[in-house]
Image: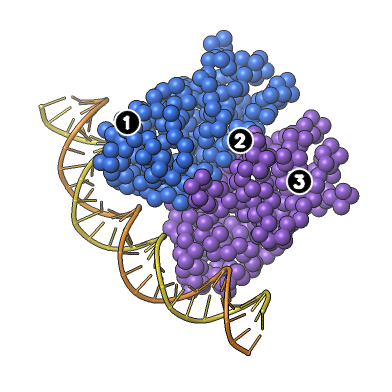
Chain colours: A blue, B purple, C orange, D yellow
Amino acid sequence: MNALATQTSFPPYSPQSQAMAVAGPIDIDQLSRHVQILRRKLAPGQHAYRAGQSFHAIYLVHAGFLKTCELSEDGRERVTGFRMRGDLVGVESIGLAHYSCDVVALDDSEIWELPYPPVMHACLYMPELQSRLTAALAEEIRNDRAWMLALGTLSAEQRVAAFLLDMARRHLRLGFSARHFLLRMGRADIASFLGLKHETVTRALTRLDRLQCIEVQRREIRLLDADGLQRMAGQGETIH
Amino acid sequence: MNALATQTSFPPYSPQSQAMAVAGPIDIDQLSRHVQILRRKLAPGQHAYRAGQSFHAIYLVHAGFLKTCELSEDGRERVTGFRMRGDLVGVESIGLAHYSCDVVALDDSEIWELPYPPVMHACLYMPELQSRLTAALAEEIRNDRAWMLALGTLSAEQRVAAFLLDMARRHLRLGFSARHFLLRMGRADIASFLGLKHETVTRALTRLDRLQCIEVQRREIRLLDADGLQRMAGQGETIH
DNA sequence: CCACGCTGTTACCGACCGTTACACAGGGTT
DNA sequence: AACCCTGTGTAACGGTCGGTAACAGCGTGG
């Protein structure tokens, strides 16, 4: 367990961002003295957990890329979010006996298993931990609400633009280029997340390409005119 | 402060429900020994708080009916939820210096102000409190996600059906009739919440009326065929 | 009493996006 | 190579929902 990264191994996180990623500041070294942290590796397609499995841990994404899927009894399904390094996964199931959704790796990933309730017990020894966890939960809510606003008020093309900007911001926060990145998910997953059909996503992407806002080649994205995208998505600030 | 209701003054809550209302089990009597709880009354149209005001408290809805609104810089707006007795309000802003959304009373309401961070401090003396708060936050996330699924996969008419069923369930949980109730919000608010236009909501309601599923007269709703609504909304279980 | 405003209802038209279909590219397997 | 399978791109068509407008119901206040 000595290979566990300390807090300083994480790139800096900006607090005003919408994506979750509040878990970064958690002092994993110290936490690992109180709870047994298991490292799990996942291949693309593998589940971190499925809806219905007994809830026993939350997870910190250490590497890779995952999606969370909400399911209904009658077979409807929807991607509710994408998770990358620094994001917490599984918090939505706290208070339940069983996980309430599916989490699937879209790429080779590594997630750190934080057993629950032991993590909550560790709050007694790490006063910071509780407020960090609570703040992470609250940020998750804000994140979901921000997307609800977007999905309810933006057109298909605007949603795709907003989605690309969100991806760009999150890549940037992890120290990668915001101008040029690879989508780790297929059109169908993007469409599901945005409440669209995959053909519509394709159309929007090719149109944004024709408008010289971006350059698309399958999953490779290049942002040519981030400001144009911002205006299109109806958001004020610019990514740097 | 002696008029503060104790835990037993709340109607029973069913844990498997999707609406928030986890706050019920909080022992307000005991909590009021540790933090100063202020009772605020609101008239219809009054704000509990607005986005941008400094964050200093979360609220427990004691009576009435409120809506939470998400705003964007460019003026878009969306109702993200409706709150009634037993619901917690303001938790989405935990960890921020300022509230992130608007909360508006739709009816004469009374909300109990729980100052923050003092409430978190009180967790030291009330070990139950922390897990209850965390569970409430988690349930809020699940609630949002369940609606994301619905809004992304259901047609306009199905969404309206699902909305009515949700209202019915929540009325029932508070001890009111699930078969016959009054909507406290206008068509525009329902539409905003469901990602539709108010005319579309109207059309859906009149169609459900013609199908004999419900009886509508302005804001008065009578459920004639709850099972039919369930099937229409693609949900399994029945409300009793 | 009527004027006025707000909310809700209905109709018509048009646009956006879903539906369907098919072609093509890439990766893996035999 | 040839094959499949999945993911992606493109196009034609149609339905659902949005846009706009006019009207009705209800409460308020002059």
**Which residue: 77% across, 32% down?**
B121
**Which residue: 28% across, 34% down?**
A215
State the SS at label 3. Answer: strand
Q: In the rendered view, would you say B156 is above or below A39?
A: below
Q: Nearer the viewer, residue B171 or B228?
A: B171
Count residues near mark 3 (Cα–Cα under 10 Å), then give few for <14, some for 14-19, many for 20+: many
The residue pinned by badge 1 equals: A222
The residue pinned by badge 3 equals: B113
Residue A137, x across and y down, in percent: 61, 35
Q: In the rendered view, would you say B155 is above or below A171?
A: below
Residue B216 seen in render:
yes
State the SS at label 2. Answer: helix
Q: Is residue A196 left or right of residue C25?
A: right
The label nearer to you, 2 versus 3, is: 3
The residue pinned by badge 2 equals: A137
Q: Is residue A42 left or right of residue C29?
A: right
The chain identifier of the residue carrying mark 1 reads A
Q: Is residue A146 left or right of residue D10?
A: right
Count residues near mark 2 (Cα–Cα under 10 Å), then give few for <14, some for 14-19, many for 20+: many
Residue B13, x across and y down, in percent: 71, 51
Residue A73 seen in render:
no
Real-space Cα separation, disc 2 to disc 1, in angstroms = 32 Å
The chain identifier of the residue carrying mark 3 reads B
